[in-house]
Image (cartoon, grey):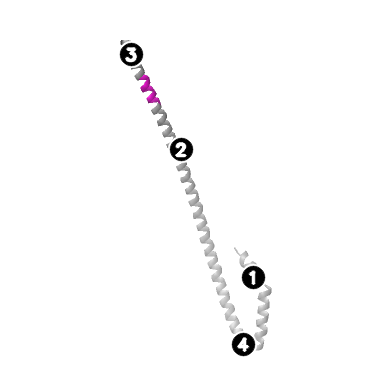
């Protein structure tokens, strides 16, 4: 009888040891999954910060480029205004026949230099 009790106790201890081992394995696997998820989250957060930084740099670059373009537009607007003033003065001082000749010359000049003007406009960056 004492041997039966000892055998039963030994079987209970073995069953409990297996249960503890299974619980331990489950806990280790759960901790491993959580650690992997944390690493992935950390990586994604770093990636997010990198993309945010790159986006901020692009925004700042575009802002500087817009300021440059605004300055160019202002300059070109002033030049156009000056040219219009000069053209108005010339028209006041010359006859109609002379104006037609000048207009033809100006038109020819701008048409023949259109590519150069476009090249200058786009190369000033």
Residue indicated by mark 3 = 6
Distance of label 2 from label 3 (alpha carbons): 44 Å
Q: Position of residue 70 (x, y in %)?
A: 53, 67
**What label sits on residue 93 in the rendered view?**
4
Q: Residues within 10 Å of mark 4 (few under 14, many from 20)?
A: few
Instruction: Say whether marks 1 and 2 touch (CB < 8 Å).
Output: no
**What label sits on residue 117 in the rendered view?**
1
Q: Residues within 10 Å of mark 1 (few under 14, many from 20)?
A: few
Residue 102, quarter of picture: bottom right
Residue drawn at 39 percent across, 23 percent down: 18
Q: For marks 1 and 3, give the one nearer the viewer.
A: 3
Residue drawn at 56 percent across, 77 percent down: 81
Q: Residues within 10 Å of mark 2 (few under 14, many from 20)?
A: few
- Left or right: residue 4 versus residue 49 is left
- Left or right: residue 103 versus residue 71 is right
Number of dots carrying numbers: 4
């Amino acid at each position: 009888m004492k041997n039966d009790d000892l055998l039963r106790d030994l079987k209970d201890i073995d069953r409990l040891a297996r249960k503890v081992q299974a619980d331990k394995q489950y806990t280790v696997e759960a901790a491993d999954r959580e650690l992997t998820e944390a690493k992935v989250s950390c990586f994604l957060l770093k990636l997010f910060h990198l993309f945010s930084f790159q986006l901020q740099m692009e925004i700042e670059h575009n802002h500087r480029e817009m300021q440059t373009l605004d300055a160019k537009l202002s300059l070109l607007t002033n030049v156009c205004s000056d040219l219009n003033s000069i053209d108005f003065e010339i028209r006041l001082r010359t006859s109609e026949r002379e104006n037609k000749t000048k207009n033809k010359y100006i038109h020819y000049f701008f048409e023949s230099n259109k590519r150069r003007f476009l090249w200058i406009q786009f190369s000033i960056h």
